[in-house]
Image (cartoon, rainbow, N blue to C red):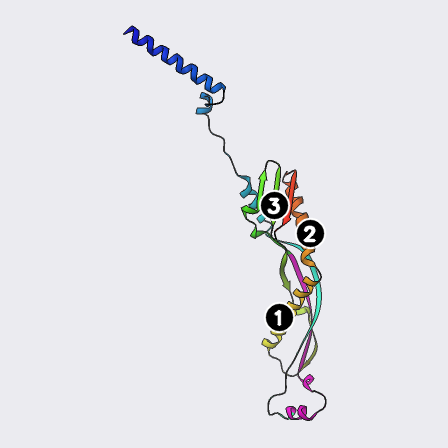
């Protein structure tokens, strides 16, 4: 009986010694760490994505432009005007003609709602981000910004709206020709870099996605 107790105590001493050696070499956690609450590890990438997305559509450049659009109608078939046009040396289509001068506001920027976790990498105080390329976010044409330069003949609301849609496409094309997308990219990169710096990041790399 005494011999068995002695063997048990020796075994416990060996086991305890082995445990404390393992703790000293960080092979096993200590008793305090076993029973203490585990630290909560939070991935800050989704948090950063959420904060950036709150900016949503970031308008980097607002441009004002003016275009002229026009349309004309041929003479109705069998009408007296059509007969006159057939024998006239100069075309008379200008009798039914609509010319509009339209001013528009073009808003160019970056849609940050398209930003995904794969486009952000964070390590310590360093962050690398790839933002979507700039695009034309909106083209605003108010009725008060439309001037009728020439209006001859009868024009339905649908025909007038079609002409205004052509004006929007002209405004879009002119904005691209002026290089507004590139300028908006440069401005967006600067704004996002400053925003990340305000959040406390030291090493910042922000580029535009291809």
Residue located 46% across and 25% down the image: 36
Q: Within 10 Å of the Cα at label 3, are there few (<14), some (14-19), or many (20+) other Cα atoms?
A: many
Q: Within 10 Å of the Cα at label 1, are there few (<14), some (14-19), or many (20+) other Cα atoms?
A: some
| Callout 3: SS | strand
Q: Residue furthest left?
A: 1
Q: Distance between the residues labelled 1 and 3?
A: 36 Å
Residue located 66% across and 49% down the image: 189
Q: How far apart are marks 1 and 2 (CA)?
A: 29 Å
104 in the magenta segment: yes
Viewer-side label of 1, 2: 2
Q: Which mark is residue 129?
A: 3
| Callout 2: SS | helix
* Residue position for label 2: 186
* Residue position for label 1: 165
Residue located 41% across and 15% down the image: 16
Residue located 64% across and 48% down the image: 207
Q: Distance between the residues labelled 3 and 2?
A: 14 Å
Q: What stretch is highlighted in magenta?
A: 81-108
Q: Within 10 Å of the Cα at label 2, are there few (<14), some (14-19), or many (20+) other Cα atoms?
A: some
Viewer-side label of 1, 3: 3
| Callout 1: SS | helix
Q: As displayed, is residue 176 above or below residue 208? A: below
């Amino acid at each position: 009986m005494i011999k068995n107790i002695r063997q048990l105590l020796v075994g416990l001493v060996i086991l305890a010694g082995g445990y404390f050696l393992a703790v000293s070499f960080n092979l096993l956690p200590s008793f305090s760490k076993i029973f203490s609450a585990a630290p909560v590890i939070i991935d800050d990438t989704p948090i950063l994505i959420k904060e950036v997305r709150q900016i949503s559509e970031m308008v980097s450049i607002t441009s004002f432009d003016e275009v002229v659009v026009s349309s004309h109608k041929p003479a109705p078939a069998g009408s007296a005007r059509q007969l006159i046009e057939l024998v006239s040396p100069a075309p008379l289509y200008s009798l039914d003609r609509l010319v509009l001068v339209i001013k528009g506001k073009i808003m160019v920027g970056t849609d940050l709602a398209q930003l995904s976790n794969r486009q952000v990498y964070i390590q310590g105080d360093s962050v690398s981000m790839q933002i979507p390329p700039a695009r034309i976010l909106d083209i605003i044409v108010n009725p008060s910004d439309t001037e009728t330069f020439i209006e001859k003949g009868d024009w339905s609301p649908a025909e007038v709206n079609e002409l205004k849609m052509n004006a929007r496409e002209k405004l879009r094309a002119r904005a691209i020709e002026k290089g507004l997308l590139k300028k908006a990219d440069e401005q967006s990169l600067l704004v996002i870099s400053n925003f990340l710096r305000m959040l406390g990041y030291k090493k910042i790399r922000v580029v535009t996605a291809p």
